[in-house]
Amino acid sequence: MKLQAKRIATAAVVGGGGVAGAGVLFYGLVLGQALLARKTIPQVISPPPRADGVFGAHFDGEPVRLVVLGDSSAAGYGAEGPSETFAAAVAAGLAEQLRRPVRMRCLAVVGAESKGLPPQVEVALRQRPDIAVISIGGNDVTHRVSIPTAVRHLVRAVRTLRQAGIEVVVGTCPDLGTIRPIQPPLRWLARRWSRQMATAQTIAVVEAGGRTVSLGDLLGELFYAEPDRMFSFDRFHPSGAGYLAAAQAVLPTVVAALTEREEPAVEAPRALAAGEGVRSLPQAAVEAVHRPGTEVSAAQVAGRDRGPAGRWAQLRRRVWHRLPQQSARTPDRAAEPA
């Protein structure tokens, strides 16, 4: 984790070709910011809390099977207890909304890049889940993995899950420019690369049959206003309050994916200035990146999946209410091992 800022700085200069004079000054400035960030972002010292188990066991019905895949943001690193993790918040909220038990297994790995998804998917398939939630991309950005390479691994994971009949919701790459230890101009580079990754993820995931929710700088205003509450001890990962806010953005799409399993939405295109409606997928992906909390899913227009500019996509900003209290986000009983 301490090396991430330096990796961004080095890649910025080397990748840009290094213009004489100005390039050297820019490198010195960015590297200085990276070194400062390294001093304030500690390394991972312990695994995140485990929240696997059955949520909402008091509800009737067959449990919904949920798996959560990805990196530290999906694993809940920085949360103080199991009930404060992202996965627990999604599982508890899903149980509350569907009025059914939810059996959740979190397979995310701290430090994972998109290329690390195959082992997680392999274990996930053994769980026979109804839905998978994936949060990935931040480490691909900090390690400067090429976007096509990172997205290719993500698409393979989504397609494998969809071919098994599993619904997939992907929280796209968050805006690393919101991280306080990263200062300008390093922050500006991190923001640009994060948005490029998120845009490419959105297009690829929807093409592969999944749904996306843009996280972007969704938590930016809250993090700037209340950094001590929204960030964990390392000032890099979210706290329990931060993970709860992220879960609030993703959960409506998770519920919709399980309850709207019919054909893609069919609509006529609406004005591009509107916050919701049908767009070409590339346009939808760009808008979603700049409007955090936006869901993108496949759509049809006049019975067709594609138009002149590519696949049709539906943008939605689903209104959500308060998630269950922290005590309700504790599993009622542990999940069986895979």
Image (spheres, grey):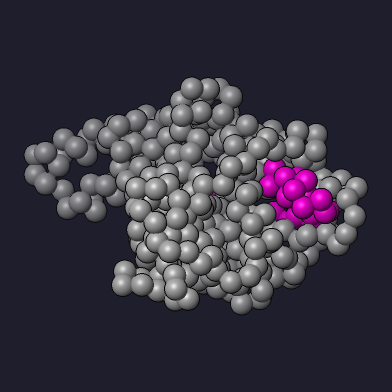
In this picture, is 294 found above or below 279? Answer: above
Please state the horizontal and vertical placement of residue 296, each as a whole percent of the image. Answer: 49, 57
Give the magenta range. Answer: 89-115
Query: Which residue is drawn at the image coordinates 38% and 45% (left, top)?
Result: 290
Residue 255 point in image, percent of width and height? 67, 54
Q: Which of these two is toward me, 321 or 191?
A: 321
Q: Quadrant of the C terminus?
A: bottom right
Q: Residue at x 44, y 70 (%)?
A: 301
In the image, residue 124 above or below residue 228: below
- The residue under the point 59% across, 48% down is 250
- Judged left or right of residue 196, residue 100 is right
Q: Nearer the viewer, residue 217 or 333?
A: 217
Q: Is residue 67 above or below residue 119?
A: above
Q: Position of residue 21 (x, y in %)?
A: 9, 39
Identify which residue, 114 or 170, lies in the foreground: 170
Left/right placement of residue 257 relative to residue 138 reads right
In this view of the protein, can residue 143 be seen by the observer? no
| Magenta highlight on residue 99 | yes
Left or right of 56? Residue 281 is: left
Lateral position of residue 210 relative to residue 59, left or right: left
- Along the line of sight, the residue nearer the viewer: 219 or 179: 219
Residue drawn at 90 percent across, 47 percent down: 58
Where does the image place residue 240, in percent across and percent down from the top left?
65, 34
